[in-house]
Image (cartoon, rainbow, N blue to C red):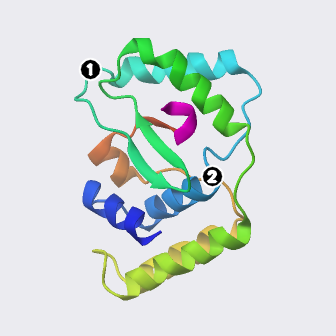
Amino acid sequence: MKEYILNERNLHPYALPQDYIKLIFQQEFGPGHLIADKNYAEQRLLNEWEEVHHLPYEAEQDIGGGYVRVCLKGLDEAQLGKLNEAFVKSANQMSGSNLAFESKLDEFVVMAKDGVFDFGFDEAKAAVEEYLAGGIRPTSHTKQYHDHYKPAYRVVRKEYWK
């Protein structure tokens, strides 16, 4: 887990605790929701791609747990169908456990205590406690993360993307 958190810190130094919680959630549970309508998912993908495809290409990010974040920036339009297939298959495959997820959150808080991030232990611990108080669920990136990185990606199982 540590190597993926450290990679995120290096790739996105403006990430805040909530952004790491999102990463850890995705590593444990993948996309985190079922996709009932493949065509709707594809239309959303196309709409998002149209907003960012002109931006410089970003390589996929291995986030652990058998998942990668496939960035839409600079992605060739011909890849969208394959990406949507991988996303829908990944989303509809149940994975992860609450216990393992909570253990990874604890590891993240310990890393904050060890001074790994620009934010401190108290901020990381409070963010995790606030998140868990609302139940384990997908979460969004912070405004700061959006402002700096304009995230646009799909989380997919590696074996479906390769």
Looking at the image, the residue that sits furthest to the left is 56
Where is residue 105 shown, x and y percent of the image? 56, 74
Label 1, secondary structure: give it. loop
For the view shown, which residue lies furthest in the top direction? Answer: 78
- Is residue 118 shown in magenta? no
Choose the circle earlier in sequence order: 1 or 2.
1
Please give the name of the residue rendered at 67% of the width and 32% of the height, measured from the top-left corner.
89
In the picture provided, is 17 more to the left or to the right than 40?
left
Residue 8 higher or lower than 109, as above or below: above
- The residue where tag 2 is placed is 138
- Secondary structure beneath dot 2 equals loop
Residue numbers of the magenta segment: 157-162
- Residue underneath mark 1: 54
* Dominant SS in magenta: helix
Q: Measured along the vertical axis of the image, is residue 58 above or below residue 1?
A: above
From the viewer's side, name the closer residue of 111 and 128: 111
Q: Position of residue 36 (x, y in %)?
A: 77, 27
What's the residue type where badge 2 is placed?
A: Pro
Q: Amino acid at mark 1?
A: His
Residue 14 in sight from this viewpoint: yes
Q: Residues within 10 Å of mark 1 (few under 14, many from 20)?
A: few
Q: Are marks 1 and 2 in contact (CB under 8 Å)?
A: no
Q: Is residue 10 above or below residue 47?
A: below
